């Protein structure tokens, strides 16, 4: 449930319950990435994810359905095979913003070709974000709160393709997949409006100001970082170096990292 003061009486507040108001907000998809002779795959995506995503019935799936060359069709003048025909890697249409959270699966602006390893490592990061959203939900339902807590989540594709530099060309299939994706996350809070009905709050969630979180309030339990993510800037760590250029940019007002024990970033490499 999400709760909000809706009568504005400071000495006798009434709280609306069981109303989804803050699920996903400020969703932003960048343009398709420019890869050799085709614009293909997502360049960047971001969204604010709120505690009400954990309410029953609020998560969907948005399974990937986007098709076209060079995913499942030959690209004219391009590689001699499509990703679905490649026998070297089990390619997956990986969401930048997870479909369960509301990220679309029918649009290549939110999908990139990921190897099985790359997709599994991104799922590890998404599991950590899920745990944090659940912590936001548990805090929200634990008492009368003046602010919502959530996470601003951003994913950017690498400028460099998965193909080796000396093998990058229009006919190399791996030239159409990113070498890595950069995932960045920040805890945020939104002060709840007063004298606003829940339906109006939900309709206007994109317009409410958000704030960085220097420290979490008493009673907020930050989830433990997965062991495989602890102390590394890349997944998988072996053989990969962080710091490559990425497409797009962070959304306007994206907070700087705070020393709150949660904010961070990590690169997910294809191998």
Image (cartoon, grey):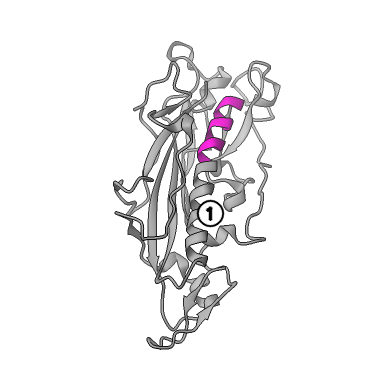
Q: Is residue 89 visible?
A: yes
Q: Residue furthest top?
A: 166
Question: In front here: 235 or 27?
Answer: 235
Left/right of residue 53 with respect to residue 143 in the rendered view: right
Stretch in magenta: 115-126
The dominant secondary structure in magenta is helix
On screen, residue 144 above or below 228: below
Question: In front here: 29 or 81?
Answer: 29
Report x, y in % for residue 26.
45, 58
Would you say residue 124 sits in the magenta stretch?
yes
| Within-10-Å neighbours for mark 1: few <14, some 14–19, many 20+ | many
* Quadrant assignment, res 68: top right
Question: In front here: 32 or 264?
Answer: 264
Report x, y in % for residue 173.
58, 20
Would you say residue 261 sits in the magenta stretch?
no
On screen, residue 19 above or below 43: below
| Residue at mark 1 | 134
Identify the secondary structure beneath mark 1. Answer: helix
Residue found at x 32% / y 51%: 255
Q: How many marks?
A: 1
Residue found at x 63% / y 55%: 59
């Amino acid at each position: 449930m999400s709760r909000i003061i809706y009568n504005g009486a400071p000495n006798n507040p009434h709280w609306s319950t069981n109303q989804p108001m803050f699920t996903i907000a400020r969703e932003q998809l960048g343009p398709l990435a420019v890869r050799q002779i085709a614009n293909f795959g997502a360049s960047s995506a971001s969204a604010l994810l709120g505690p009400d995503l954990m309410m029953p019935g609020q998560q969907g799936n948005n399974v990937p359905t986007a098709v076209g060359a060079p995913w499942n069709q030959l690209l004219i003048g391009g590689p001699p095979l499509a990703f679905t025909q490649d026998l070297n890697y089990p390619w997956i249409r990986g969401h930048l913003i997870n479909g369960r959270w509301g990220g679309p699966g029918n649009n290549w602006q939110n999908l990139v070709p990921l190897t099985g390893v790359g997709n599994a490592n991104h799922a590890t990061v998404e599991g950590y974000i899920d745990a944090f959203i659940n912590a936001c939900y548990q805090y929200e339902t634990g008492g009368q709160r003046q602010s919502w807590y959530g996470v601003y989540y951003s994913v950017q594709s690498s400028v460099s393709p998965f193909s080796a530099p000396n093998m990058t060309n229009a006919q190399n299939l791996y030239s159409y997949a990113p070498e890595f994706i950069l995932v960045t996350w920040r805890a945020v809070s939104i002060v709840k409006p007063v004298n606003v009905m829940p339906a109006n709050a939900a309709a206007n969630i994109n317009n409410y100001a958000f704030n960085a979180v220097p420290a979490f309030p008493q009673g907020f339990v930050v989830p433990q970082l997965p062991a495989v993510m602890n102390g590394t800037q890349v997944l998988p760590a072996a053989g990969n170096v962080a710091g490559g250029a990425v497409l797009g940019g962070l959304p306007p007002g994206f907070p700087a990292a705070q020393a709150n024990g949660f904010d961070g970033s990590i690169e997910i490499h294809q191998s």
